[in-house]
Amino acid sequence: MFDRRGVAGFGFPAGIAARTAIVRERSLRRSARRAPSRYKGIPPAVTDIIGGRVAMLFTTTISAAPHIKSGKLRAVAITSAKRQSSMPEVPTVGETLPRYRAEAFQGMVMPAGVPQAIVGKLSAEVVRILQLPEIVQRFQLDGADVAGSTPKEFDAFLQAEMQKWGKVIKDAGIKAEQ
C-alpha cells in the first residue's frame, strides 16, 4: 500500500535484521496504515529509503551510519540496550519502551569438534585484535561498537537470543514462509 505521495510505509531488509523485523512488522502492521515492503537484502532497502520509495526503514547502524552522517537519512532510534558510541544523540527504543532490546550482532563460529586449544587461541587473538585502537575506531566510524567475548560467553549469548526470539515467534504465531 502507498500513501498519497506514492511512498510505501516501511521497509524490512532480510539478513541480519530479519530476526527483529518479524516482531516489528507484526506490531507495526496492526498500527500502520501502509503495508510493509520486504527486501532481499539491506542495500536495496537503503537505496529505497534514500530515494523516497519507503517512508521508514529498520536496518543496521553499519548500513545506515554513512547516510546519517551525510544527511541523507535521519536516525529516529536504535534498538540496542544502550546508545551507540558513534551516534550518542540517537535515543534507544528502550528509552520509550522500557526493556526493549533487539541488537544485530556479528560473531565467529567454527565447526563442532575443533580442538578447544585451537578455539581458545583463535578467540584470544580475535579479542586482542578487536581491542586495538585503530580497529575500535574503524568499527565506530562504521556505526558499530566492538564487544569481544570468550567462546563460552558468546555461546551463552546465542542461547539466550534463541530462547528469547523463539518465544516471541511462538507467542506471535509466526510461521515460516516458503
Image: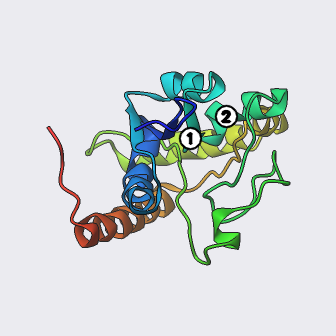
- Along the line of sight, the residue nearer the viewer: 17 or 4: 4
Q: Which mark is residue 70?
A: none
- Along the line of sight, the residue nearer the viewer: 93 or 166: 93
Horizontal and vertical percent position of residue 66? 75, 28
Q: Residue at x 28, y 68 (%)?
A: 172
Tags 2 and 1 touching, CB below 8 Å: yes
- Disc 2 to disc 1, C-alpha distance: 10 Å
Residue sticking out furthest to the front: 4
| Count of residue discs | 2
Q: Which mark is residue 57?
A: 1
Q: Residue at x 46, y 44 (%)?
A: 17
Q: What amino acid is found at the position of numbered circle 1 in the picture?
A: Leu
Does residue 145 show up? yes
Quadrant where the C terminus sits is top left
Q: Which quadrant of the structure image shows residue 47? A: top right
Name which of mark 2 and mark 1 comes first in the sequence. Answer: 1
Looking at the image, residue 105 lies above or below residue 49: below
Crowdedness near tag 2: few (<14), some (14–19) or many (≥20) residues, C-alpha within 10 Å: many
Q: How is the image coloured?
A: rainbow
Tag 2, which secondary structure?
A: helix
The residue at which mark 2 appears reads as: 64
Horizontal and vertical percent position of residue 90? 78, 54
Foreground: disc 2 or disc 1: 1
Q: Residue at x 54, y 35 (%)?
A: 4
Tag 1, which secondary structure?
A: strand
Q: What amino acid is found at the position of numbered circle 2 in the picture?
A: Ala
Quadrant where the N terminus sits is top left
Does residue 14 show up? no
Q: Residue at x 85, y 54 (%)?
A: 89
Crowdedness near tag 1: few (<14), some (14–19) or many (≥20) residues, C-alpha within 10 Å: many
